[in-house]
Amino acid sequence: MKKLSLSLLPHKYAVCQFHPDKHIPYWALLGDFVSLAIATYATDYLLVKEENVERALQVLEQAGHYIAR
C-alpha cells in the first residue's frame, strides 16, 4: 500500500445536507472556505468527526502514513 503524506488542517469544518430544491442559506456561504462538493483533481480531503480525530491520526500513523501537524 502506498504511504501518504497528510496534513491536519487547523480549522473546524461543518458538513451540512440541504434540500436539493431549496435555496442555499446565506450562512452556508459565510467564512473563508465554502464548498458545495469537495472534489478536485489536485488533492483529496479526509473528513473525520472532531471526537475521532486523535484516534484517526493514531490509526493512520500506525499504518505508516506521515501526518504534518
Image (cartoon, rainbow, N blue to C red):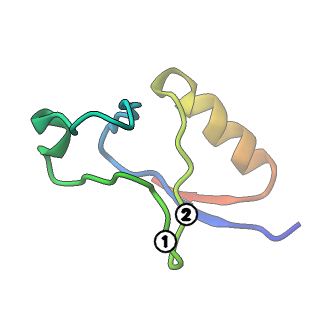
Instruction: In the rendered view, tell whether residue 12 sits above or below residue 3.
Output: above
Viewer-closest of 3 and 13: 13
- Image coordinates for residue 66, horizontal then vertical, percent: 64, 61
Viewer-closest of 52 and 46: 46
Disc 1 and disc 2 in contact, CB within 8 angstroms: yes
Question: Mark on residue 44?
Answer: 2
- Image mark count: 2
Q: Is residue 1 left or right of residue 49?
A: right
Question: Helix, strand or loop at disc 1?
Answer: loop
Image quarter for residue 26? top left
Closer to us: mark 1 or mark 2?
A: 1
Query: For the point 64% across and 36% down, which residue is it?
Result: 56
Instruction: In the rendered view, tell whether residue 42 sits above or below residue 19.
Output: below
Instruction: In the rendered view, tell whether residue 51 sits above or below residue 39.
Output: above
Query: For the point 37% across and 30% down, which residue is it?
Result: 19
Q: Is residue 11 left or right of residue 17?
A: left
Q: Is residue 12 left or right of residue 28?
A: right
Image quarter for residue 59? top right
Locate the N terminus and report the quarter of the image it occupies. Answer: bottom right
Question: Mark on residue 2?
Answer: none
Instruction: Identify residue for label 1.
Output: 40
Most distant residue in the right direction: 1
- Image coordinates for residue 5, horizontal then vertical, percent: 61, 67
Viewer-closest of 27 and 54: 27
Amino acid carrying label 2: it is: Asp
Amino acid carrying label 1: it is: Thr
Viewer-closest of 60 and 34: 34
- Image coordinates for residue 48, horizontal then vertical, percent: 54, 36
- Image coordinates for residue 65, horizontal then vertical, percent: 71, 59
Image quarter for residue 30? top left
Query: For the point 52% across and 42% down, which residue is it?
Result: 47
**Callout 1 environment at 10 Å: few (<14), some (14 to 19), or many (20+)?**
few
